[in-house]
């Protein structure tokens, strides 16, 4: 029973603080690749949280939300700067000092490359909403502390800087891909999470303390972000054809090629890659730049949050179906396609040996992505794709001891430097099975719920 082992791994990963479960370690590997895998990463906790909520243990998620909210004041501040309480840590751990337990947060200051976890606060908000759906505990969401925390997050994320588009500008490695990978600027995954966060804030912010105008503004931001992403990120055969014939260097307000993308920048691998039923949202957009790489998590979240239209969502699932070997392969799901190679790899990654072609972030296969994949497949009615992916993954993952990622064009090899007993590889699989067997679980994150007021989701049984 692979899932039984997965549940055991989740139990083993639980981190306690003052006797209460507050999070889960990234991995339970006795010789992990890096010391910080024993910490609880905010993004890694998401599938753990979904499993806890589906199993009637929502109080652990509440403990986590409270813990992260409390430790956000720990961040170190650069000289001459002011602390922004809207930033949430990448990870935290519990240490013992003078016989006392202490929580220690990392905001990127101990991370490789000092990358900033822009996605943490967005995942925190995502879980806050799921927690309210699972537990009905509106008092928590409406408490003064949580309301203040949400406002501080928005204060940071909506702050005006040098915007020329409604998308959020971030440095490289600010989300799941937390190393230099040419994902600076306006990466899709951040835009999808940002979109989800704006929707959640609109729903959960109380109309008090002068937040009325903020809530009104959120709706405008949601609409402009959605239409911008749909116009500028979507690529199908028609759009590609338009880019192929773009005129460049157009001045003025009413131009077609607003970002001045040169048709010559279309990579060779795109030739013939899209059939007339498939499409996807590009990885990134910026001045003179379309990152044509396919990023799985951003596309799947765009389906779940309704950032993509219903037709576009079908187009994305068609792309998976038509490129099954490349995008799903022997271990669902490839994080990004295609890998950067040769001199491009040197320039884009800074010659990172962990991110060599078809490994890790550079085109590796990540089992955790099975949960958004199955969720998106169920949402678009593509049950056969969910089944096929689940069949590919389930036995193998347990047999291989829950590796963090796989290498190779088809993901056939265990990642060279992958941890074993990686918690989100196990929890991702549990969540995927749960969603497949009981589509009602989708209420915890699926955006159909955004159009209607939050409905309490009934727990469907205790799996522990
Ligand atoms: C790697 C992943 C990151 C994850 C962390 C802990 O750094 O890129 O997304 O949060 O490991 O599992």
Image: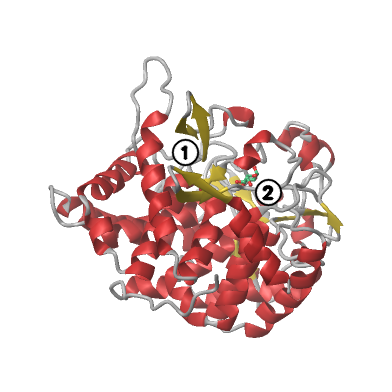
Does the image show residue 29? Answer: yes
Disc 2 vs disc 1: Cβ atoms closer than 8 Å? no
| On screen, residue 191 above or below 352 | below
User: Is 308 or 292 nearer to us in this picture?
Assistant: 308
Looking at the image, which residue sits at the far top?
79
Question: From mark 2 to mark 1, how far is it between C-alphas?
Answer: 21 Å
267 vs 151, left or right, is right
User: Would residue 60 appear left or right of 110 to someone viewing this image?
Assistant: left
Q: Secondary structure at mark 1?
A: loop
**Residue 304, placed above or below residue 154:** below
Which sits in the foreground, 294 or 101? 101
Query: What is the count of numbered marks?
Result: 2
Foreground label between 2 and 1: 2
Give the residue pinned by disc 2.
28
- State the residue in front, 458 or 313: 458
Q: Which residue shows up at 61% across the image and 65% down it?
A: 280
Relative side of 206 to 416, left or right: left
Q: Quadrant of the N terminus?
A: bottom right
Residue 284 image point, x, y percent: 58, 50
Image-based side of 11 in relation to 444, left or right: right
- The crowding category of the residue bearing disc 1, from other C-alpha atoms within 10 Å (few below 14, some 14 to 19, many at least 20), is many
Q: Residue at x 77, y 46 (%)?
A: 340
Q: Position of residue 303 (x, y in %)?
A: 52, 69
For residue 89, the mark is 1
Would you call the spot at circle 2 few (<14 residues within 10 Å), some (14-19), or many (20 or more)? many
Helix, strand or loop status at disc 2? loop
In the image, residue 5 lies at what x, y percent? Answer: 70, 65
Q: Is mark 1 within 8 Å of ligand 1?
A: no
The residue closer to the viewer here, 122 or 444, is 444
Q: Earlier in the sequence, mark 2 or mark 1?
A: 2
């Amino acid at each position: 029973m692979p899932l039984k082992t997965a549940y055991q791994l989740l139990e083993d990963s639980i981190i306690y603080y003052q006797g209460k479960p507050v999070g889960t370690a990234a991995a339970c590997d006795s010789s992990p690749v890096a010391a910080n895998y024993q910490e609880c990463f905010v993004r890694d906790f998401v599938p753990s949280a979904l499993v806890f909520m589906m199993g009637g243990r929502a109080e652990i998620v509440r403990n986590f939300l409270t813990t992260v909210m409390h430790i956000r004041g720990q961040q170190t501040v650069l000289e001459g700067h002011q602390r922004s309480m809207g930033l949430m840590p990448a990870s935290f751990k519990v240490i013992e000092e003078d016989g006392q337990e202490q929580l220690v947060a990392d905001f990127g200051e101990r991370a490789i490359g000092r990358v900033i976890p822009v996605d943490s606060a967005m995942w925190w908000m995502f879980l806050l909403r799921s927690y309210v759906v699972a537990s009905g505990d509106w008092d928590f969401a409406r408490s003064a502390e949580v309301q203040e925390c949400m406002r501080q997050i928005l204060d940071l994320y909506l702050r005006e800087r040098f915007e020329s588009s409604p998308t959020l500008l971030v440095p490289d490695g600010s989300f799941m891909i937390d190393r230099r990978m040419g994902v600076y600027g306006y990466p899709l995954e951040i835009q999808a999470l940002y979109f989800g966060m704006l929707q959640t804030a609109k729903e959960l912010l109380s109309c008090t303390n002068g937040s009325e105008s903020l809530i009104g503004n959120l709706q405008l931001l949601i609409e402009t972000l959605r239409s911008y992403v749909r116009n500028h990120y979507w690529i199908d055969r028609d759009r590609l054809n338009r880019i192929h014939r773009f005129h460049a260097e157009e001045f003025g307000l009413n131009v077609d090629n607003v970002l001045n993308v040169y048709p010559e920048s279309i990579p060779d691998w795109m030739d013939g890659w899209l059939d007339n039923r498939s499409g996807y949202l590009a990885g990134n957009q910026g001045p003179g730049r379309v990152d044509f790489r396919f990023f799985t998590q951003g596309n799947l979240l765009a389906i779940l949050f309704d950032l993509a239209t219903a037709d576009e969502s079908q187009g994305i699932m068609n792309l998976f179906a038509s490129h099954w070997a490349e995008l799903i392969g022997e271990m669902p799901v490839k994080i990004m396609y295609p890998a950067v190679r040769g001199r491009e790899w040197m320039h884009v990654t800074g010659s990172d040996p962990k991110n060599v072609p078809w490994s890790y972030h550079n085109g590796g296969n990540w089992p955790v992505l099975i949960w958004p994949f199955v969720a998106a497949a169920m949402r678009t009615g593509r049950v056969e794709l969910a089944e096929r992916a689940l069949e590919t993954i389930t036995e193998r993952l347990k047999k291989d001891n829950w590796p963090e990622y796989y290498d190779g064009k088809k993901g056939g090899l265990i990642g060279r430097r992958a941890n074993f007993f990686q918690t989100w590889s196990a929890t991702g699989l549990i969540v995927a099975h749960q969603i497949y067997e009981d589509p009602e679980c989708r209420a915890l994150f699926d955006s159909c719920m955004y159009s209607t007021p939050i409905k309490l989701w009934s727990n469907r049984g205790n799996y522990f």
